[in-house]
Image (tube, helix red, strand yellow):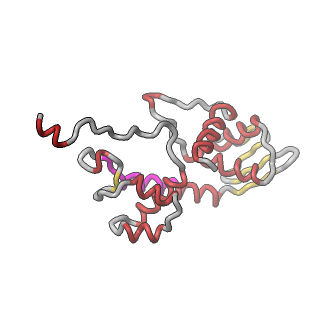
Amino acid sequence: MNEDLTFLILRQEFTRVLQVSAKATDRKRHRLAFREVLYFKPKGALESGGVQMHPEDRRALYQVLVDKPAEVGAWRRKGLRLERTGEVPVTMDLTKIARATQATLRAYQRGAGLVERRADRCSGEPVFRGTRVPLAQVVEQCRAGVPVAEIAEDYPQLSAQALHYAELRARMGKAPGRPAKPLKIQMSAVEAADR
């Protein structure tokens, strides 16, 4: 699926269906919390299994998982056990899903700590800490399907954790918005030296 389409679907789910307003204070993007990410797992599993979920039903599922009441609408939560009553009763154990989601989020957060941005290194582009290897370059190689073992050979200074982080970033898709403008050289080095 197209990365931009995935982002639009997530944003529409939050604003139109769940009616959760993205809090754009200080012009920062809304960062999804663990339980908000977790919501998309059972929702996706149910929909891929052919279960039709109306917007009210999705809002109730979101509230049960994120706001933590024991019961909303047809949804009931007992610890990590999720139940839905009604025409199509559903019972899900979220233990494995929650553990996998937590592990992925932890790996992402640790990996983000391995990246730095300094003006004196690669023109301020994000690079892996202590190297001159641009994050974007490794991420694009992962998106292109280059095996991680091959990338590790090309960049022996990168740890397994850094490579895993690049893989996670590649799966997330490209950030929305306009791409950065290319640099324009207004005068050559010789012209600048003559001034």
Q: What is the x, y in percent for residue 125?
A: 34, 47
Q: Is residue 26 magenta?
A: no
Q: What is the x, y in percent for residue 130?
A: 28, 58
Report the residue at 72% width, 50% height from top.
Answer: 82
Q: What is the x, y in percent for residue 147?
A: 50, 68
Q: What is the x, y in percent for residue 33?
A: 54, 43
Q: Is residue 112 magenta?
A: yes
- Direction from residue 11 to residue 110 in the image, left or right: left
Q: In this picture, is 185 found above or below 42?
A: above
Q: Quadrant of the C terminus?
A: top left
**Total number of numbered discs in the rendering:** 0
Tell me the chief SS of the magenta region: helix
- Direction from residue 17 to residue 123 in the image, left or right: left
* Residue 150 falls in image quadrant: bottom left
Q: In this picture, is 38 found above or below 21?
A: below
Residue closest to the eye, 15 or 150: 150
Q: In this picture, is 50 found above or below 100?
A: above
- Direction from residue 112 to residue 41 in the image, left or right: right
- Direction from residue 31 to residue 36 in the image, left or right: right
> Which portion, as a residue range, is magenta?
105-117
Report the residue at 35% width, 49% height from top.
Answer: 126
Q: Residue furthest left?
A: 194
Report the residue at 37% width, 53% height from top.
Answer: 113
